[in-house]
Image (tube, grey):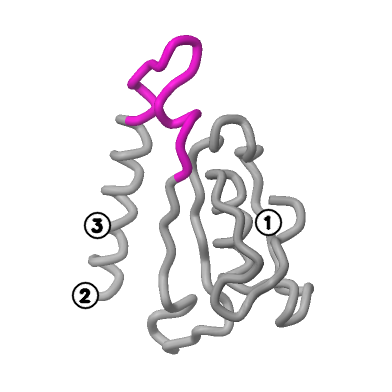
Amino acid sequence: MYLKTNQFHIQQFAYLTERMKAIKEGETSLLDNSILVATSSLFDGDLHGAEQLPFLITGKGGGTIKPGRILNYSDKGDEGRKACSLHLSLMDRMGVQLDHFGDATTRLAEL
């Protein structure tokens, strides 16, 4: 049941991504000017493992995000791979400047 639920959610995320890609905003699309994030609270639902959390990001954030990459922060240590650091990085791209968010004060490199 967990697998089917996740598959449904990702199908909906893919559908939304495609719909936003089809909506033109001048020379770009709604997706080009947006940031969509899908994530899970578990890396492995069978093991209930939460040591690695997957994030799926679509959109270009108005040209601030380079798409088509897989970024792996597992070798960056706990301080270099916080989810809250990702949120800070994304907020920067939306014009929200915060000194900290949750337990993070740094941004993710390479995003």
Which amino acid does the dot numbered 2 rest on?
A: Met
Front disc: 1 or 3: 1
Residue corresponding to mark 3: 8
Point out the tag, 1 or 2, that comes first from the N-terminus: 2
Vertical relation: 8 (above or below) 1? above
Comes first in the chain, label 3 or label 2: 2
What residue appears at the point 42 percent right and 88 percent down from the top-left corner?
48
Residue that numbered label 1 is attached to: 71
Placement of the N terminus among the 4 image quadrants:
bottom left
Residue farthest toward the top in the current orientation of the protein: 26
Residues shaded magenta: 20-35
- Residue at the disc numbered 2: 1
Decide: few, some or many residues near mark 2? Use Cα within 10 Å; few <14, some 14-19, many ≥20. Answer: few
Residue type at mark 1: give it: Leu
Residue 23 at x, y percent in the picture: 33, 21
Q: Is residue 13 magenta?
A: no
Q: Amino acid at mark 3?
A: Phe
CB contact under 8 Å: marks 1 and 2: no
Q: Residue at x 34, y 54 (%)?
A: 10
Q: Marks 1 and 3, Cα distance to the nearest angstrom?
A: 24 Å
Q: How many residues crowd mark 3 within 10 Å: few (<14), some (14–19), many (20+)? A: few
Secondary structure of the residue carrying tag 1 is loop
Are there few (<14), some (14-19), or many (20+) residues within 10 Å of tag 1? few
* Left or right: where 14 falls relative to 106: left
Q: Nearer the viewer, residue 42 or 103?
A: 103
Residue pictured at 70% horizontal, 62% vertical? 107
